[in-house]
Image (cartoon, helix red, strand yellow):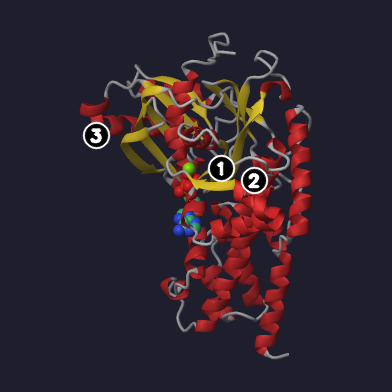
C-alpha cells in the first residue's frame, strides 16, 4: 500500500474509533436519562444528581456581593452588583492562577492561598468595595450539600489531589482560612458549583434559562427539578424547585476506545469521570498526544526521532487542538524542525476528530436533560454555557449544533446555546442574593411556597 493509502486507512480507523453517530447519541440519551432517574431516586448511579438547596432567581434580587470562583485552572475574586431588574455588573475583578504545586498541597495551604487572594483583592479595591461582606464561594468540584452554605467534598477531580479536604466542609475550611488572614467580618453566604452559578447568572435576566453547563477544564451541568422528585428532600415543599447538579463528568455508560482507556489508566482517578475524560478541556490535549504517538509508532506521521516531542504527559492542551484546527503551524511553534504541510494537515484532522466527538457528546448530554424536562421540546430552552472550551474553540458550538439538528431537525431551534462568560462568578452573587431568602444551615426553610 502507498504511504498516502496507509495514512488514509489509519485516519478512517480513527474516525471510527472516535465516531459518535446518531444511533450512538440516541442510545447515550436513553442511558443518560436512566441514570438521572436512578440518581434522583437515591439509587446507585454514575449521575449523582446533587441538590443545591437553591431555586432559580426571579430577577428582582439586588445588592452588592463578593464572589470567589475556583474553577480548576483559575481563581477569580470579584464584586458584583445586582440592580433588581435583571442587570448584573461586575464592579471589580481579579484573576489568579492556581500554582501547580498547590494542586498537590495540603488543604490548609490551598485555602490559605484562596484567603490571601481575597485579601490582596481587597487591598486593590478597598476604597470602592469594603462594604460588601457577603461572600459567595463557587467551588467546582463534586460536593454534597446539606444547606446552601455548607458542603462536603466527595472527591477531587481535574488534577487536584489536595490532602485533608475530601470528606470535609469546604465552607468551614474557607471561613477558617479567612479568619487566619484576619478577614473575620466575612460571611460565606453560599456555596455553589460553577454550573449552578452559570444557570443563576443567565436566569437572572432570562427566565427561559433552565440549564447551566460548563465546558472548561472540566465539564458538568445542572437544571431545576421539583423537590418532590428528589429522594431525601422531605424537608422542602414538594413543588418547590431545586437546582440539581448532575456531576455528569462521571457518567460512565459510554464506551471508551483504546485511547480513552490509556488516558484513564494513567490518570489520577482511574475509572472515574469517564465522560469528562472524553469531553473536557483538561483531557483533549492528552488524547491528541496519545493518538499522535500511535501514528508515529505506526510510521504514518513524522518519524521515530520526533517521538521525543510528544513524550511528556499533558504536554499538549486543548488549545493545541483548536490552533491546529484553525490552520496554525503548531509543529514549528513546538520547535519541531522539517515538518511538512501534510504533517500539519493530518494534525488538524486528528484534532477535529477528537474535538468533534467531545462537542457531539456534550450536545447529546444537553439533549438528554432538556428532553427530560420537556419530552417533545415544545418550548424554548436557553442553555447557559460557561468555559473556555466552548468560548474559544472555534468549531465547538457548530459541532454541538449539528448534533442537535441530527437529533431533532427543526425543533433543535428550541435549544439556545448561550455563552455566559463569567457566569460561574456572577452567578455566585445571584446565589448569595437568593440564599439570603431561602435556606441556610442554621435556619428553617423560609422560602415563599
Ligand atoms: P476553568 O475550568 O478553570 O473555570 P476555563 O473555563 O478557562 O477555566 O477552561 C480552561 C480550559 O479551557 C483548559 O483546559 C484550556 O486548555 C481550555 N482552553 C483555553 N483556551 C482554549 C482555546 N483557545 N481552545 C481550546 N481550549 C481552550
Ligand atoms: Mg470556570
Q: Residue at x 71, y 60 (%)?
A: 20
Can you tell me whether the CB of the residue at mark 1 lies under 8 Å from the nearest atom of ligand 2? no
Residue 328 drawn at (x, y percent): 44, 72
Kindly report the distance in space between the C-alpha atoms of the residues bearing marks 2 and 1. Answer: 8 Å
- What crowding class fits label 3: few (fewer than 14 Cα within 10 Å), some (14-19), or many (20 or more)? few
Disc ID at residue 333: none
- Horizontally, residue 23 falls left or right of residue 118, namely right
Q: Residue at x 50, y 37 (%)?
A: 198
Compare residues 273 and 199 and report the one nearer the observer. 199
- Between marks 2 and 3 in the image, the one whose residue lies nearer the viewer: 2
Q: Earlier in the sequence, mark 3 or mark 1?
A: 3
Residue 396 drawn at (x, y percent): 55, 58
Q: Earlier in the sequence, mark 2 or mark 3?
A: 3
Secondary structure, mark 2, is: helix
Q: Do callouts 2 and 3 mark residues in contact (Cβ within 8 Å)?
A: no
Quadrant of the image occupied by residue 34: top right
Residue 92 drawn at (x, y percent): 30, 35
Kindly report the distance in space between the C-alpha atoms of the residues bearing marks 3 and 1. Answer: 35 Å
Seen in the picture, residue 300 relative to 166 is either above or below; the reply is below
Q: Is residue 224 visible?
A: yes
Compare residues 376 and 327 and report the one nearer the observer. 376
- What crowding class fits label 2: few (fewer than 14 Cα within 10 Å), some (14-19), or many (20 or more)? many
Q: Do callouts 2 and 1 mark residues in contact (Cβ within 8 Å)?
A: yes
- The residue beneath circle 1 is 383
- What crowding class fits label 1: few (fewer than 14 Cα within 10 Å), some (14-19), or many (20 or more)? many
- Between marks 3 and 1 in the image, the one whose residue lies nearer the viewer: 1
Quadrant of the image occupied by residue 131: top left
- The residue beneath circle 2 is 366
Q: Quadrant of the N terminus?
A: bottom right
- The residue beneath circle 3 is 124
Amino acid at each position: 500500500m502507498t504511504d498516502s493509502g496507509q495514512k488514509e486507512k489509519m485516519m478512517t480507523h480513527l474516525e471510527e474509533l472516535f465516531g459518535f453517530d446518531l444511533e450512538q447519541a440516541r442510545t447515550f440519551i436513553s442511558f443518560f436519562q436512566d441514570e438521572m432517574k436512578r440518581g434522583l431516586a437515591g439509587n446507585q448511579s454514575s449521575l449523582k444528581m446533587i441538590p443545591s438547596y437553591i431555586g432559580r432567581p426571579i430577577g428582582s434580587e439586588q445588592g452588592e456581593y463578593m464572589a470567589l470562583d475556583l474553577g480548576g485552572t483559575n481563581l477569580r475574586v470579584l464584586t458584583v452588583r445586582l440592580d433588581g431588574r435583571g442587570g448584573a455588573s461586575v464592579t471589580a475583578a481579579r484573576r489568579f492562577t492556581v500554582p501547580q504545586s498547590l494542586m498537590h498541597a495540603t488543604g490548609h495551604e490551598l485555602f490559605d492561598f484562596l484567603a490571601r487572594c481575597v485579601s490582596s483583592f481587597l487591598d486593590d479595591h478597598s476604597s470602592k468595595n469594603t462594604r460588601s461582606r457577603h461572600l459567595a464561594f463557587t467551588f467546582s468540584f463534586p460536593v454534597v450539600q446539606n444547606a446552601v452554605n455548607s458542603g462536603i467534598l466527595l472527591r477531587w477531580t481535574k488534577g487536584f489531589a489536595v490532602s485533608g479536604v475530601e470528606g470535609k466542609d469546604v465552607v468551614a475550611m474557607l471561613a477558617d482560612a479567612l479568619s487566619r488572614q484576619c478577614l473575620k467580618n466575612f460571611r460565606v453566604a453560599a456555596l455553589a458549583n460553577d454550573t449552578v452559578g452559570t444557570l443563576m447568572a443567565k436566569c437572572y435576566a432570562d427566565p427561559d434559562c433552565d440549564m447551566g453547563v460548563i465546558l472548561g477544564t472540566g465539564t458538568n451541568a445542572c437544571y431545576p427539578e421539583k423537590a418532590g422528585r428528589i429522594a431525601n428532600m422531605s424537608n422542602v415543599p414538594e413543588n418547590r424547585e431545586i437546582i440539581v447538579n448532575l456531576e455528569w463528568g462521571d457518567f460512565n455508560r459510554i464506551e471508551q476506545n483504546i485511547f480513552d482507556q490509556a488516558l484513564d489508566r494513567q490518570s489520577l482517578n482511574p475509572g472515574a469521570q469517564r465522560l469528562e475524560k472524553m469531553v473536557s478541556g483538561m483531557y483533549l490535549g492528552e488524547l491528541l498526544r496519545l493518538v499522535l504517538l500511535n501514528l508515529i509508532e505506526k510510521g504514518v506521521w513524522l518519524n521515530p526521532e520526533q517521538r521525543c516531542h510528544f513524550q511528556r504527559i499533558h504536554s499538549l492542551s486543548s488549545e493545541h487542538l483548536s490552533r491546529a484546527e484553525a490552520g496554525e503551524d503548531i509543529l514549528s511553534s513546538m520547535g519541531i524542525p522539517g515538518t511538512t504541510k501534510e504533517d500539519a494537515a493530518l494534525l488538524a484532522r486528528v484534532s477535529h476528530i477528537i474535538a468533534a466527538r467531545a462537542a457531539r457528546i456534550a450536545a447529546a448530554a444537553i439533549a438528554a436533560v432538556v428532553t427530560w424536562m420537556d419530552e417533545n421540546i415544545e418550548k424554548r430552552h436557553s442553555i447557559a454555557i460557561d468555559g473556555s472550551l466552548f468560548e474559544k474553540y472555534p468549531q465547538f458550538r457548530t459541532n454541538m449544533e449539528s448534533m442537535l439538528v441530527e437529533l431533532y431537525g427543526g425543533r433543535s431551534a428550541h435549544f439556545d446555546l448561550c455563552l455566559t462568560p463569567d457566569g460561574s462568578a456572577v452567578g455566585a452573587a445571584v446565589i448569595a442574593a437568593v440564599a439570603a431568602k431561602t435556606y441556610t444551615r442554621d435556619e428553617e426553610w423560609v422560602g415563599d411556597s
